[in-house]
Image (cartoon, rainbow, N blue to C red):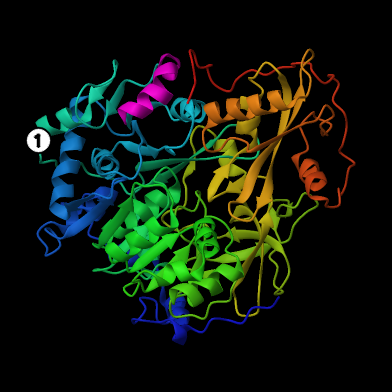
Amino acid sequence: MAWEPIRKTRHQAVQPNLADYEGECREFSWQAARRSLDGLPGGQGLNIAHEAVDRHMGTPRSDQAALRCVGKDDKVTELTYRDLYVATNRFANVLRELGVGKGERVFTLLGRVPDLYVTVLGALKNLSVLSPLFSAFGPEPIRERLYLGDGRVLVTTPEFYVRKIAAIRESLPGLKHVLVTGVGPTPEGTLPLAELTAAARGEFDIPPTDPEDMALLHFTSGTTGRPKGAVHVHEAVVAHHLTAAYALDLRSPDVFWCTADPGWVTGMSYGVIAPLSLGLVLVADAGEFDSRRWYRVLQEQGVTVWYTSPTALRMLMRAGDALAGGYDLSRLRFIASVGEPLNPEVAVWGLRALGLPVHDNWWQTETGAIMISNYAAMDIKPGSMGRPLPGIDAVLLERGEDGRALVTDGHVRVIEEAGVDGELALRPGWPSMFRGYLGEQERYIKAFAGGWYLSGDIARNDKDGYFWFVARADDVIKSAGHLIGPFEVESVLMEHPAVAEAGVIGKPDPVAGELVKAFVTLNSGFEPAEKLRLELIAFGRRRLGAVAPKEIAFDQNLPHTRSGKVMRRLLKARELGFPEGDLSTLERPARKPGDQGDRRPSCPPATGSTDD
């Protein structure tokens, strides 16, 4: 159906930060945006932690709330900017005393608790590189990322250490220190974070920081191969700061809640850095999703701007309009979503049930910040990603037969006509653009062509310059806002003695967007049976955690390309009853079903139990 635009005059509560989109696009420069930040004293560079915390010292914000953490028991822990300043200084000093220096990787495996925010910003003050892990990961994804990222320090909870880390610790010789949160006895082989920070000095001078110094390492799954470590630098804070003001309409004294897990890029860029750089109050909830709980947090914390996922909004919509009407959400003035395309129905539902529409936006781990958005001062076209940020040049490129941008002798062709599908591409140069894939220069180079960054997403635009998501050009699975690489899931399933081969796809789901389904070929001596299917689901859950397959089907004749790669595209077409398309590359591999073939791991194997 065709959706009528939601007119800005129906939902605009305050003067938007980006009131004149066309004018700002004409006059915009990243150099001017950089001047809105403080910079290190004495012109010694640009540091993310300084912009998020230290620059507020000596201002009226010093003793205002910076962070409100709602615990699972509903107890609220509040830290002022001064509290955060001292705590992050202490953690930076802990790292220095442990001999952890510039460029060395500090990983977090934590939920939305105060120690997470202190660790992130303290590590950045020390010029260490911060790499967050999704707290629902099982041991195998954790091990692979720690190995690939050459993790030196891991900050986690005692429970996570016992369940997920202890059994893989010996396979990570580079991991020198594991710091565990909380008070009381610590597991063998770990150090007590609380004791170390309590003994550390509360003053720390941030060293000179080149804006191009590596700051963040975000792992993102691909359709083939191991996870990619996207490298971001301290200059990214310029884009975090500006895009939060323009796309999310944030300003002090907003109370802001970003529901994204801190293990993903959204939870870091907009769940930590951007809101603190703007000097507002950041809300974090350690509890699991529950409709009543989320409405209660919005009400009790007086949230004014809310950034969440389409999955969560669909679940709230399913709970009914009446439930939303039972809470006082009068302080809420702006809602935005990210993580997957937003259904038009949800944008309209927000206006009906919450009194506000939902503003969708688009960006990627590699872009580091929002690139395309629906803005407070603009009409919303339900289902659209919106229009590019000032300073962002976005186009659509003609595609070849493989669905990706057509590149001829290094050149690409830009689509000029509205309404034509093409690969979404961006002109490089924004501050939060990733600077590489860790240790994979060739892979990084392939992400660019003809002077453009190739997003891998297919979109179209209209005559008004709004962009619309069509499909992904690859087969990464998006489930509940999380990116899941099929290869990673397949590799773990193949570690089970019954599994010779696996193919994994995303299957549409009305709530999560997609759920993970695996097709497995069994080794000789194993027969398809319900008991084995349940065993494989449990095995996947233990190894992979929340990204494990929800469904498993047995298939002794998986389709392959001529190179032996499982054709996930064909599996998905057959599953959904879609046309199978061109099958000219289809060929059965030389090995027979049940043969193991060469299945060398991409990094040293884990040892011991990996029960989650």
Q: Which quadrant would residue 355 be assigned to in this image? A: bottom left
Q: Secondary structure at mark 1?
A: loop
Q: Is residue 567 left or right of residue 135?
A: right
Could you tell me residue 427's position as x and y percent?
Answer: 55, 60
Residue 227 visible: yes
Residue at 73% across, 61% down? 398
For the record, the magenta segment spans 157-171
Q: How many numbered marks does the figure carry?
A: 1
The residue that disc 1 covers is 201
User: What residue is drawn where x is 42% and y is 51%?
Assistant: 260
Residue at image position (25%, 63%) is 280
Q: Residue at image x 75%, y 40%?
A: 568
Quadrant of the image for the N terminus?
bottom right
Q: Main secondary structure of the magenta part?
A: helix
Question: Per the image, is 611 magenta?
Answer: no
The disc labelled 1 sits on which kind of residue? Answer: Arg
Picture coordinates of residue 513, whole percent (x, y): 61, 53
Question: x, y (%) of residue 569?
Answer: 77, 44
Vertical placement of residue 207 versus 473, above or below: above
User: Residue 508 location in percent, x, y?
Assistant: 68, 51
Relative to 161, residue 263 above or below: below
Q: Is residue 283 above or below residue 321?
A: above
Tell me, yes or no, if residue 357 can be seen here. Answer: no
Q: Residue furthest bottom?
A: 9
